[in-house]
Image (cartoon, rainbow, N blue to C red):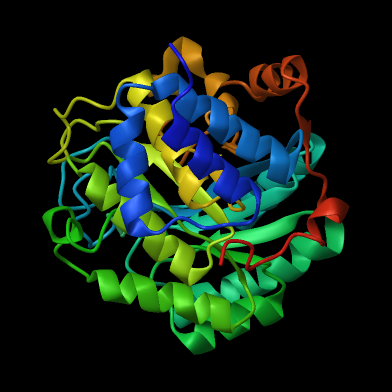
Amino acid sequence: MPMNIYILQTAQKILTGGQLDRKEISELIKESAAHPHDLLYWANQIRLHNFGNKVKLCSIVPGRLGGCSQDCAFCAQSSRYKTHIADAGYTGDDDIIAAAEKACKNKVPNFGIVYSGKTISEQELQRLEKLAAVIRSKLPVKLCCGLGIISKQQAHRLKAAGFARYNHNLETSRRFFPQIVSTHSYSERVETIKAAVQAGLGVCAGGIFGLGESDEDRIDMALELRQLGADTVPMNFLHPIPGTPLGDRKPPEPAEILRIIAMYRFILPKAHLKIAGGRVLNLRDMQSWIFYAGATSLMVGDYLTTAGRKIEDDMQMLKDLNLEPILTNEQSSESNRAVK
Ligand code: SF4
């Protein structure tokens, strides 16, 4: 089958520094339905053009796990659902420091501390300020955190404490969000991301796919992330958790996941697309295809509520693909506002 001209021309526009508008994205998706391999081929070309063979690796540790008052329909950590980790538990300082040491040893330079819950208390913020000082004095990691909804003042304190970036996902589109979460608003999430940007933190913001959202919802979220200036976009794919409202929902198939990644590469050509939760379960034998679809970043090790795969397996996969992890000193040149 000959190459689809519209996909080719759209890719050329991006490769020469252009940006797609909403109408062009919708047309691209329509055209790619009969030409899925063209979409992947050009997504890979855009990845190579902007990132070469470099990939960004991240790992996370929960500072607080479970016991969350919120009702996000996919989440094992909500105390509203009967799941394997609905009750709150804290990870001690020593264990968090040990996890950061392990990340360094594994050459994973981005290390995130993540809290369940709508937000954090003053006491928890003080703990994190002290912990950041200890970790930064010992280890060459880039520290990240995800602590829920935070104010501008809290964002400034995290920046002053030495955190490099803030993770806060939009999860889905503004239109679809109320069907997934009722206990806080989409605007609160957007304001948190703006607070992080204003404080000078890098922004790691993405969402979760396979909740029942449409392609239009996916485009909406990507455009919102582009507008907000997220430089790293975590892409999670539903891992149905028994006991949650989405526990019986069928997750997306590998081909659909690759199509979504490729679509995001076209919309966010310079953002790191980080494939995170649901990767192992949903992609099965097709893990390595994510790079051909345009991904440039991986969450390695265990996820918050589900096990990942062995880091050695991921490192071997990167080596076999001739991909090289970005090291800490290379990241200093990363643009925080890469995707505007
Ligand atoms: S996604 Fe975050 S805010 Fe929502 S239930 Fe889970 S831990 Fe709570």
* Residue at x 22% of width, y 70% of height: 184
Would residue 282 be found to the left or right of residue 229 on screen? left
Q: What's the residue at 17%, 40% (across, down)?
A: 212
Please identify the quarter of the rendering in which residue 197 is found.
Answer: bottom right
- Whether residue 301 appears in this view of the structure is no
Q: Position of residue 91 (x, y in %)?
A: 52, 51
Nearest the camera: 98 or 115?
115
User: In the rendered image, which quarter is residue 51 located in?
Assistant: top right
Quarter holding the N terminus is top left
Tell me where residue 306 appears, x and y as whole percent: 41, 32
Q: Which of the pair 45/93 is nearer the observer?
A: 45
Q: If the picture is divided into quarters, which one holds ligand 1?
A: bottom left
Residue at x 64% of width, y 46% of height: 15
The image shows a total of numbered marks equal to: 0
Rendered residue at 60%/84% (across/down): 156
| Viewer-side residue, 4 vs 193 | 4
47 relative to 109 in the view: left or right:
left
Quick check: can you spot residue 21?
A: yes
Q: Is residue 143 left or right of residue 195?
A: right
Residue 30 versus residue 153 in the image, above or below: above
Q: From the viewer's perspective, is residue 265 above or below residue 189?
A: above
The location of residue 333, given as percent across then percent down, is 81, 61
**Residue 25: percent from the left, percent from the top?**
37, 48
Quarter of the image that includes the C terminus? bottom right
**Farthest bottom residue in view:** 153
